Amino acid sequence: MEQPILTGRLLVATPVLDDPNFRRSVVFVIDDNESDGTLGVIVNRPLEVPVNEVLQGWGGYADAPEVMFSGGPVGAGAGVALGMPRHEETPLGWSPLESAEARDRVPGLGMVDLDTPPEILGDALDRFRGFAGYTGWSVGQLSAEIEEGAWYTLPATSDDVFSNEPGSLWPRVLRRQGGDLALVSTFPDDPTLN
């Protein structure tokens, strides 16, 4: 069975995923294709580092909390940024997500080219979030993890990506799904204490 393209969706860690890099993480999938694999950023892991300390000049444009986020264990020295323009025209230094399906899923969300001077692009953005590192899976790797029960694939909203309360994002995303997933949202952090 062919896996659907996940660009523009969320990967939400199931309670059985205990890898410390991904435990209770919510990953926004930036790109997913059959030739390169899957790339995403963890959207619920704020760091205690102000955006301006890492991405000079971008601090004033960042959504609250105005800190860098740990996007994942790959390329921790690399910066990735997501943003949404204020207006419909495409500003210089911003590009929409690759697939049309993803653009329909989360309208207006795209990549920010951090080489663009913030004074040129910053005011054209309505929302901005910076990530240190990213997540990545080779072709077929993520599909196998999903089949093993490590991830839920769920719809994303821009409010998930730019949440001002990232610490509670994991249970909130699960709760809004209703049914069994709403019940999973109450799963204790440490089931041995239950």
Image (cartoon, rainbow, N blue to C red):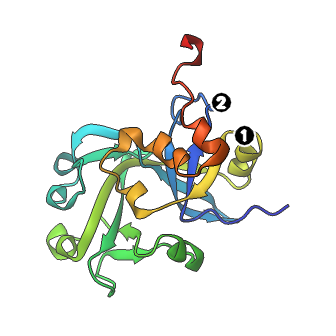
Left or right, 129 with reference to 189: left
Q: Residue furthest front?
A: 179
Q: Residue at x 30, y 38 (%)?
A: 47
> Do the residues bearing badges 2 and 1 touch, measured as CB atoms within 8 Å?
yes
Q: What element does badge 1 sit on?
A: loop
User: Tag 2: residue type?
Assistant: Val
Q: Residue at x 29, y 49 (%)?
A: 164
Is residue 45 something that shows in the picture?
Answer: no
Q: Residue at x 25, y 56 (%)?
A: 63
User: Tag 1: residue type?
Assistant: Gly
Left or right, 101 with reference to 49: right
Res. 160 mark: none
Task: Determine the image quadrant of residue 57.
Answer: bottom left
Res. 16 mark: 2
Q: Earlier in the sequence, mark 2 or mark 1?
A: 2
Q: What element does badge 2 sit on?
A: loop
